[in-house]
Amino acid sequence: MSGGANKIVIDPVTRIEGHLKIEVELDHGKVVDAKTSGMLYRGLETICTGRDPRDAQHIMQRICGV
Amino acid sequence: MRKISRREFVRLCGMSTAGLGLMSVLGPQISQTLVEAAESKVPVIWIQASSCTGCSVSLLNSVEPGIATVLLDVISMRYHPNVMAASGELGMETMYKAADRYAGEFILVVEGGVPTAEKGRYCIIGDLNHKEITAVEAVKHLGSRAKLVVAAGQCASFGGIPAAQPNPTGVLGVDQILNPRPYPRKHTVVNISNCPIHPDHLIGSLVYILTYNELPELDQYYRPKLFYGPTIHDTCFRRPAFDEGVFAKQIGDYGCLANLGCKGFIARSDCQKRGWNNNVSWCIAAGVPCQACSEPIFPDGCSPLYGHMPVTGNRK
């Protein structure tokens, strides 16, 4: 809140599935930069490699339970 | 009437219960009852780590009791990322304050495995005071203050899918984080280990604990024997076909599903008795082999999921 520059960080964003972080940079009330970041990595593609192809849908369906 | 600022109002909403966020969708008129219920019910803090949210969705799908009953009559949900009103710093403050205020009283429910590689940075659950809080840090902090920790789901219990070979993010089950071997066990952890949880198992275990003020009898993997007793094989409705030697050759056939890859021989869960989705059906009734999703060896020890286990008629 000094010099007009301000950064707002919202982490976690709630009422969604998963982990999301929002960063907004303000300059005298105007948005000058905004970032969204996914805050979870599991490596499901790496996990799937080398498995029986019939297992792929069972592994990948666990990307999201919604 | 005293004027309150928007920030104060949001703080009020955040400080009451997480369930308020959901109740405004399900029934705004019962929000007041929820606020009153909040103070008298056991507080629950529900965090998600390397999860898919399937366990939370499964809980929300509970028919009897419905989610409204659970939030009003059974527990006071203090933090739940999918339904709570607060977000960001306010949300994280709410979580830490609830843990301090109800230390030794609240139940911590963890959904999802806990990644440990790169100091746990593969899962950040929030940002507080410009510091990113990793899942492993949150589990340890909250777990040490909780009365009881419930690992909701295969991933939180045993690592689950994200822990499958080659486990790129070093995912461990909650029990392995809080009670690492070879040190003596310090924290009470109850594993509800299906993928996703059966809502009856979680709600049933919580109600048992709240009613009798003690844990239900747990098996060697800390799962309640109430729900994880006999194997699927011993309770399966297709068992007479197995006993007769009638085996299904493809999905949809009558007969035992052993040759299609059923792992019911080693899986313990009461799926036959309880069914899924309010007993509409369950895997084997739908013609699909059991994948032993409740077992510690899932999925690698059960792979390939359609590959058949060795079956010996002489096995005792």
Image (cartoon, helix red, strand yellow):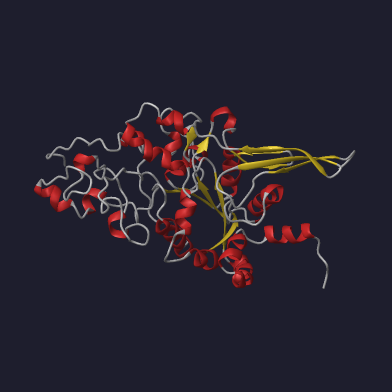
Q: Is residue B171 left or right of residue B18?
A: left
Looking at the rendered image, the quarter that the C terminus of chain B falls into is top left
Could you tell me which residue is drawn at 30 percent across and 48 percent down? B268
Closer to us: B57 or B230: B57
Query: Where is residue B2 shown, x and y percent of the image?
Result: 83, 70
Furthest residue in direction right, as rendered = A3
Query: Where is residue A21 shown, x and y percent of the image?
Result: 65, 41
Q: Do we see residue B27 in this rendering?
A: yes
Could you tell me which residue is drawn at 23 percent across and 54 percent down? B235
Looking at the rendered image, the quarter that the N terminus of chain B falls into is bottom right
Could you tell me which residue is drawn at 59 percent across and 46 percent down? B142
Query: Where is residue B182 shown, x and y percent of the image?
Result: 46, 33
Which quadrant of the view contains residue A23?
Answer: top right
Q: Is residue B237 left or right of residue B192?
A: left
Which quadrant of the view contains residue B27?
Answer: bottom right
- In the image, residue B177 above or below residue B199: above
Q: Is residue B211 left or right of residue B95?
A: left
Which quadrant of the view contains residue B281?
Answer: bottom left
Closer to us: B147 or B89: B89
Could you tell me which residue is drawn at 45 percent across and 28 percent down? A46
